[in-house]
Image (cartoon, rainbow, N blue to C red):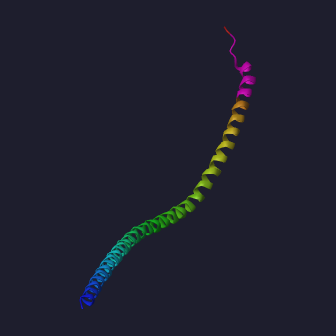
Amino acid sequence: MAGKEDEKQERDELADSLNDLFTNLSTMIKGDLQGTNNLLELLEKMNLRVAEEYKGFGDVASGLRIFVEQLKAKSGSFDEYVQKIDAIEHQVTEFEAVISMLDKYVSLLESKVQPFYQVPPS
């Protein structure tokens, strides 16, 4: 009977060892799963934070788009004035050319008429 008791004791020790092994493995797997779960929760929080940031960027981009559209509308209304200014500048250039020609003509006339109006010394 001593043999059977030894065998039973060895089985109990083996069962206890296996039980400890499975308990330790179970604890290790639970720890790994909890760590993975914590990482996933952190990733979810980071994604929510990034989504908030991008929403803010979207609002800024939308505001900039509206601002650019307003600038384009104002620029379109200024185009008419720019065309008028260009036309006036062209007319002024032509007017300066005419004045220059008239000045030369008056100088030429003056030089031709000047000898007739010189007073002889007395």
Which range is magenta?
107-120
- Residue 60 among magenta residues: no
Position in image of residue 48 (x %, y %): 38, 73
The answer to whether residue 39 is above or below residue 91 is below
Identify the residue shown where x is 70% and y is 38%: 97
The correct choice, above or below, for 100 with respect to 77 in the image is: above
Residue 3 position within the rendered picture, expressed as x and y whole percent measured from the top left: 27, 88
Among the 4 quarters of the image, the one containing residue 111:
top right
4, 38: nearer the viewer: 4
- Name the one closer to the observer, 78 or 116: 78
Q: Is residue 112 magenta?
A: yes
Q: Position of residue 63 (x, y in %)?
A: 45, 66
Residue 25 location in percent, x, y? 33, 78
Residue found 66% across the figure and 39% down from its top: 96
Quarter of the image with the N terminus in it: bottom left
Q: Main secondary structure of the magenta part?
A: helix
Q: Residue furthest top?
A: 122
Front residue of 71 and 35: 35
Residue at 37%, 70% in the rendered image? 46
